[in-house]
């Protein structure tokens, strides 16, 4: 009986090594050895955006994207919600209004609790307005119209477009740009990053969004997962260099044998 099909052995080995690195990091984190995450440039940009909105006396608009909590895009929504927690707490600290537009129904109560808890943590629960965390529509472009309408009416000093975005990404970014808002965007959807880069002041590129989310969460396990994934990058770099050298010296047969194992 064949347990591993030909051509999948190499992938299995890489998967086992990477999984082992992540679980090892998690185990260390649970014993108190939490990996250090450097302060990314995106963190400073987020702080600057909240500060600018406060100085202008204008609100903040936050969209956590249109992805749900499950499936392959769910991680983007969770990262966006972690960042929302930090933005909301900073906004509460400086008495700045924050408006959150929601598309997915199950995300709404989570976002409400995150914002409410942020204001409570700063001792300003009386400043929390539950109407500022709004369910707009499950329809993609109806939701997009709702967010853009909020931007036009409220004229925010800063907008945060972080999470899973599709065709609405450039629409949001253009409206925010036209009203002069300082815009922070982030998504792991590679087909939308270029639109955010073109129209926003700062963009969290792919994995940076997850790293910033882990940074703000303070959760040792999430930080450990990021550190474990960095080990995967080291493996990838090593394999690229090794493959290039083997190909340069005419040893493609060895590379093919390993890949097809």
Image (tube, rainbow, N blue to C red):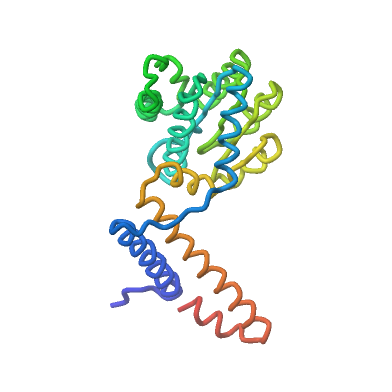
Q: Residue at x 46, y 32 (%)?
A: 84
Q: How many marks?
A: 0
Q: Residue at x 63, y 19 (%)?
A: 56
178 to the left or right of 257:
right
Q: Residue at x 36, y 62 (%)?
A: 25
Q: Nearer the viewer, residue 233 or 11?
A: 233
Position in image of residue 58 (x %, y %) = 59, 18
> Quick check: 12 left or right of 42?
left
Of the pair 27 and 191, the residue shown nearer to us:
27
Can you tell which quarter of the image residue 253 is in? bottom right
Quadrant showing the C terminus = bottom left
Q: Nearer the viewer, residue 32 or 21?
A: 32
Residue drawn 64% across and 77% down?
Answer: 244
Q: Quadrant of the N terminus?
A: bottom left
Residue 173 image-quadrant placement: top right
Query: Does residue 145 lie above or below 170 as drawn?
Result: above
- Image-based side of 221 in relation to 64, left or right: left
| Quarter of the image where one finds residue 8 | bottom left
In the depicted structure, whether residue 80 falls above or below residue 26? above
* Residue 192 drawn at (x, y percent): 61, 41
Compared across the picture, whether 49 is left or right of 108 comes to right
Q: Position of residue 122 (x, y in %)?
A: 40, 26
């Amino acid at each position: 009986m064949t347990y591993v099909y030909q051509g999948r052995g190499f992938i299995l080995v890489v998967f086992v090594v990477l999984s082992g690195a992540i679980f090892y990091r998690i185990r260390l984190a649970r014993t108190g050895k939490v990996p250090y995450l450097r302060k990314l440039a995106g963190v400073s940009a987020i702080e600057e955006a909240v500060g600018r909105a406060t100085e202008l006396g204008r609100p903040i608009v936050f969209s956590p994207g249109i992805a749900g909590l499950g499936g392959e895009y769910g991680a983007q929504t969770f990262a966006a919600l972690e960042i929302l927690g930090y933005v909301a707490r900073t906004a509460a600290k400086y008495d700045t209004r924050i408006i959150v537009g929601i598309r997915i129904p199950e995300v709404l109560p989570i976002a409400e609790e995150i914002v409410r808890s942020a204001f409570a943590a700063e001792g300003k629960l009386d400043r929390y307005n539950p109407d500022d965390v709004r369910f707009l529509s499950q329809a993609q472009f109806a939701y997009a119209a709702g967010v853009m309408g909020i931007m036009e009416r409220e004229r925010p000093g800063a907008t945060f477009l972080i999470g899973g975005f599709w065709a609405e990404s450039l629409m949001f970014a253009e409206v925010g740009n036209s009203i002069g808002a300082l815009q922070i965007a982030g998504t792991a959807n590679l087909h939308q990053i270029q639109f955010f880069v073109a129209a926003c002041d700062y963009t969290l590129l792919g994995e940076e969004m997850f790293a910033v989310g882990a940074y703000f969460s303070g959760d040792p396990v999430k930080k450990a997962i990021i550190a474990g994934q960095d080990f995967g990058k080291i493996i990838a770099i090593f394999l690229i260099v090794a493959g290039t050298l083997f190909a340069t010296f005419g040893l493609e047969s060895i590379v093919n044998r390993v890949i097809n194992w």
